[in-house]
Amino acid sequence: MENIIQRQKLEQDSLYFTIQDFRLKINECGFITAYKDLSNVDNRYFRLYYFLTDGVSFSIERKTIHFKRKTLLFLKPNQKFIIPKTPRHDVPYNMFYITFEIGNLAKRSEFFSSMKRNFPNQSVYDPNGILLKLFEEMHNQFSDKQKCAAGYAQHLFQLIIIQMFRLSETIIAQSQIKPRYSASDILLDRASDLMLSNLKLGLKMNEVADELGISDIYLYKLFKDKTGKSPLQFVSEHKILMAKEFLENRSYSIKEISNELGYSSSTHFSIAFKKATGFSPSYYRQMFC
């Protein structure tokens, strides 16, 4: 009898190339037993949290949100994440976590837009525990001090991202989050996402207002009422936070960071950064990064 060979050719689809192009890099992973807050996790990076406790309740940017066990939450840099006080302080919340960054600076806005589009509530439910197994394996690699644990973890991290996108395409992966948004909250989220996703273009306030179908005056009032800042102040402060994060990665020059954040020149960027922090970008990088 002749051998029977079943050949299946693997085709690299667009998602594969997109993920490769982002150059995602894991910074840290670990396990949290949380009683009151998550102040020990560096919020300067993108973060993933995988919840192992049922009935978890957290506050994210003015909203109290409830999660089921086996839900994965995605957070952008500097997004606030606290645990509200509960009557039972002796009962902890258990979760795995990952912090990571985008190696391809030019694709940063595209990455966040893609995550926002595929995970509108910033979460994905993992009914069969596939993501859980990946998190457990990653944690074991570091706990047992395996050889080349960092390289192995990087591959596991890419599998986690791929599985997240696969789950987002199924009905059972719909988010367990049920936020209570007001109309103004939704409008503020749309406005801030529009401005922060297009920093390089430097959208003007009237352009943002036109896109949302509201007046300049209403847009200004919306930001002042909800954040205490004008739209310009809101964007400027966010740009400084991003600049600090980018300066920590010495792969990017001052000029590249300046261009990505929408400043007209490196000089303009340096002036704005020094005014906000008291240090020039080069001095900040030298002393703090």
Image: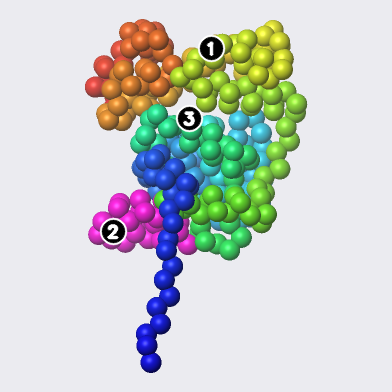
Secondary structure under tag 3 reads: helix
Q: Position of residue 76 (x, y in %)?
A: 50, 34
Tell me where the magenta segment starts and ends, as one range: 133-157
Q: What whole-number distance in Å separates the C-alpha atoms at marks 2 and 3?
A: 35 Å
Q: Residue at x 48, y 33 (%)?
A: 110
Numbered label attached to residue 210: none
> Answer yes or no: do the residues labelled 1 and 3 have beta carbons within 8 Å?
no
Secondary structure under tag 1 reads: helix
Q: Quadrant of residue 272?
A: top left
Q: Residue at x 43, y 75 (%)?
A: 6
Numbered label attached to residue 145: 2
> Going from the N terminus, do you reach mark 2 or mark 3 first?
3
Q: Residue at x 58, y 63 (%)?
A: 128
Q: What whole-number distance in Å separates the C-alpha atoms at marks 1 and 2?
A: 46 Å
| Residue 224 makes an appearance in the image | no
Q: Residues within 10 Å of mark 1 (few under 14, many from 20)?
A: some
Q: Residue at x 64, y 26 (%)?
A: 190
Q: Which residue is labeled 3 in the image?
A: 109
Q: Is residue 146 magenta?
A: yes
- Judged from this view, the residue extending furthest toward the right is 183
Q: Is residue 211 left or right of residue 32?
A: right
What's the amino acid at mark 2? Lys
Q: Residues within 10 Å of mark 2 (few under 14, many from 20)?
A: few
What's the amino acid at mark 1? Gln
> Going from the N terminus, do you reach mark 1 or mark 2 first?
2
